[in-house]
Image (cartoon, rainbow, N blue to C red):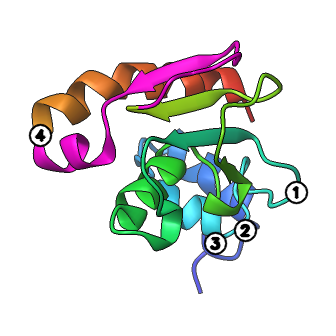
């Protein structure tokens, strides 16, 4: 075993960074392994859909990937109506009385169009920054 691999994970990452080695971690791996925002306590964001289905419906994989892109475990996402106490991502749905809202195309449009996904990304990135660690 070499000296770097014997270090605790945080020190190993720092040592690799000091050596100029870029470290890439998939967001899905970070969230599922207990990453910074993976907590499954109270919901952190609401996904509002014009159609039913949620994570178990036909657009479930897309919604799970979007939750992970925000750095959240899908269990930290509330599905249903807009909530004024949570940031909301409204997929082709009206935001209601929600205050912090990202308006997104319906999931079917996101799945069909790379341009729609690219257009949504800056708003999701800004939301991820607002959610913080």
Element type where label 1 sits in the image = loop
Q: Residue at x 59, y 46 (%)?
A: 71
Residue 31 in the image: x percent, y percent?
62, 60
- For the magenta stretch, what is the residue range? 93-113
The answer to whether residue 16 is above or below residue 3 is above
Q: Name the mark on residue 41.
A: 1
Mark 4: give few (<14), some (14-19) or many (20+) Cα within 10 Å.
Answer: few
**Residue that label 2 marks:** 7
Badge 3 or badge 4: first in the primary sequence: 3
Q: Residue at x 40, y 46 (%)?
A: 22
Element type where label 2 sits in the image = loop
For the residues labelled 2 and 3, the Cα–Cα distance comes to 7 Å
Single out the mark in the foreground, 1 or 4.
Answer: 4
**Residue that label 3 marks:** 3
Single out the mark in the foreground, 3 or 1.
Answer: 1
The answer to whether residue 30 is above or below residue 116 is below
Q: Is residue 71 left or right of residue 6?
A: left
Residue 39: within the magenta? no
Element type where label 3 sits in the image = loop
Q: Residue at x 63, y 72 (%)?
A: 3
Residue 34 in the image: x percent, y percent?
73, 64
Mark 1: give few (<14), some (14-19) or many (20+) Cα within 10 Å.
Answer: few
**Residue that label 4 marks:** 113
Badge 2 or badge 1: first in the primary sequence: 2
Badge 3 or badge 1: first in the primary sequence: 3
């Amino acid at each position: 075993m070499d000296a770097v691999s014997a270090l605790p994970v945080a020190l190993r990452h720092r040592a690799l960074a000091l050596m100029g080695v870029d470290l890439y971690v998939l967001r899905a791996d970070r969230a599922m392994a207990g990453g910074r925002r993976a907590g499954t306590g109270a919901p952190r964001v609401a996904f509002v859909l014009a159609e039913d289905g949620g994570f178990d419906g036909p657009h479930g994989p897309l919604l799970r990937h979007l939750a992970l892109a925000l750095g959240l475990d899908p269990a930290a996402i509330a599905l249903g109506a807009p909530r004024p106490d949570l940031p909301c991502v409204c997929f082709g749905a009206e935001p209601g009385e929600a205050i912090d809202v990202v308006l997104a195309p319906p999931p079917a449009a996101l799945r069909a169009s790379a341009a729609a996904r690219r257009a949504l990304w800056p708003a999701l990135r800004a939301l991820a920054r607002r959610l913080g660690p």
